Amino acid sequence: MKYICLGYLDGKQWETLSEAERCAMVDECLAYDDLLRVTWARIPHFFNSPYYVYQYATCYASTAVLLRELRGGDAGARAAAVDRFLDLLRAGASDHPMALLARAGVDLRDPATVRSVVDELDGLVARLEGELRAVGLPV
């Protein structure tokens, strides 16, 4: 199993390298570790906690909806979103998570909730592309 590092390389620079130089550069970014073959055993909560990974996905979707409401609308709508969010925090584990989120304005049964994550990421990518263009880097 390989462990990959991330880096930036200009495509034009890559094209000027020989095959041996390319291989050497790629080898620098790859680490071989026998322990990586048993990663599943080092992360037991993936297997011992029901719906663990699902909880991450629903957390991102819920957060995207909450952020959209906290950032958008007029001052009154934002104030109401803040109140719902604070009520959610105050509620702790007093009810089922779906019920608590519903009171905060998040409906995880609605496909638009998942779409909120996509919209948030689209916005972040657009922002990154704008910043790259502003400093003259290719997008």
Image (tube, rainbow, N blue to C red):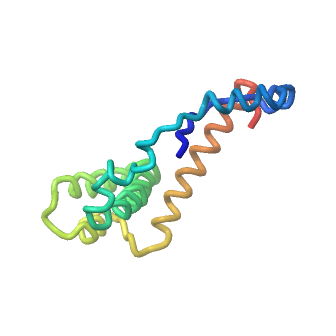
- Residue found farthest to the right: 16
* Quadrant assignment for the C terminus: top right
Is residue 135 toward the left or the right of residue 44 in the image?
right
Where residue 66 appears, x then y in whole percent? 38, 55
Quadrant position of residue 138: top right
- Residue found farthest to the left: 94
Q: Residue at x 55, y 42 (%)?
A: 2
Q: Nearer the viewer, residue 30 or 137?
A: 30
* 20 over 96 or under it: above or below: above
Is residue 9 toward the left or the right of residue 15 in the image?
left
Quadrant position of residue 26: top right
Q: Residue at x 16, y 54 (%)?
A: 90
Where residue 52 appears, x then y in whole percent? 32, 61
Q: Residue at x 50, y 60 (%)?
A: 116
Q: Residue at x 36, y 65 (%)?
A: 106
Where residue 96 appears, x then y in whole percent? 20, 70
Q: Nearer the viewer, residue 48 or 64?
A: 48
- Residue found farthest to the front: 34
Quadrant position of residue 69: bottom left
Q: How many marks?
A: 0
* 27 over 82 or under it: above or below: above
Q: Nearer the viewer, residue 78 or 93?
A: 93
* 80 over 131 or under it: above or below: below
Is residue 28 toward the left or the right of residue 68 in the image?
right
